[in-house]
Image (tube, grey):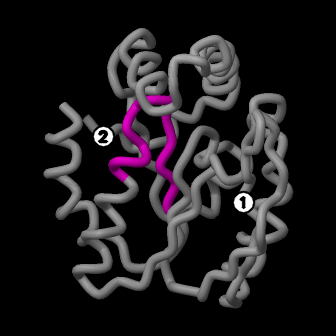
Amino acid sequence: MMSDVVRGLDDLAAEMDSGIVAIDGPSGSGKSTVADALVARLRQRGTGVQLIRTDDFATWDNPVAWWPELETDLLQAFIRRHDYHYRPRVWRDGVAKPGRLVWLRWEPLLIIEGVSSARRRIAPRLTHSLWLDGGSAAERLERAVARDGEESRPLLQRWQQFERGWFAVDGTRQRSRVLD
């Protein structure tokens, strides 16, 4: 299934040349895989693109309330066509702290990938809002555990509960183009 989505990205990349694109969906659904493949295709086409991951902001205790930081540090500069900077989270001993400052050159296309990237607050500014379901909750959990390690299972289970509520209230999937 994921390979079908990735194969279909060439047509999608042809539709994109500027603006803000969000790739959203539940944890373990394949958002990072799709984002990486889409960015590669866009760059092959000569499209200037930057990729930001919500994982650089989110923590177990703060799954979505970090948005003002992303808006202030990245989105406002992007909209003004300025280079931008942010401090991705660095995890040490299970604690996330702001890391070293990362500067990004302004490009005409910004892709934001991760849970809550297509939230209602940014929806009017998005040129594309993409959604991945990624199979059942059990399948997504196993993919996320394989990625993050068995010790993360209880945290990922709590995260899945949170995101189910978040997406139900936000209505993210209903506003997005579902990739399947």
Instruction: Say what amino acid the circle numbered 2 marks.
Output: Leu
Magenta stretch holds residue 33? yes
Question: Helix or strand or loop: what does disc 1 sit on?
Answer: loop
Question: Where is residue 162 shown, x and y percent of the image?
Answer: 69, 19
Which residue lies most toward the front here? 93
Q: Left of 104 or right of it: where is 94?
A: right
Question: Where is residue 23 shown, x and y percent of the image?
Answer: 47, 49
Crowd class of label 2 (few under 14; some 14 to 19; many from 20; radius 10 Å) = some
Instruction: Say what amino acid the circle numbered 1 marks.
Output: Pro
Please report the residue visible at 69 percent of the width from the left and 25 percent of the height from the top: 166
Q: Quadrant of the C terminus?
A: top left
Q: How many marks?
A: 2
Q: Left of 105 or right of it: where is 16?
A: left
Please report the residue visible at 63 percent of the width from the left and 40 percent of the height from the top: 116
Is there any visible trace of residue 168 in the rendered image? no
Q: CA distance from mark 1 to mark 2?
A: 28 Å
Question: Where is residue 17 shown, x and y percent of the image?
Answer: 38, 79
Marking on residue 88: 1
Q: Quadrant of the N terminus?
A: top left
> Label 2, on which residue?
179
Q: For the magenta stretch, what is the residue range?
A: 21-34
Question: Helix or strand or loop: what does disc 2 sit on?
Answer: strand
Is there any visible trace of residue 160 in the rendered image? yes
Crowd class of label 1 (few under 14; some 14 to 19; many from 20; radius 10 Å) = many
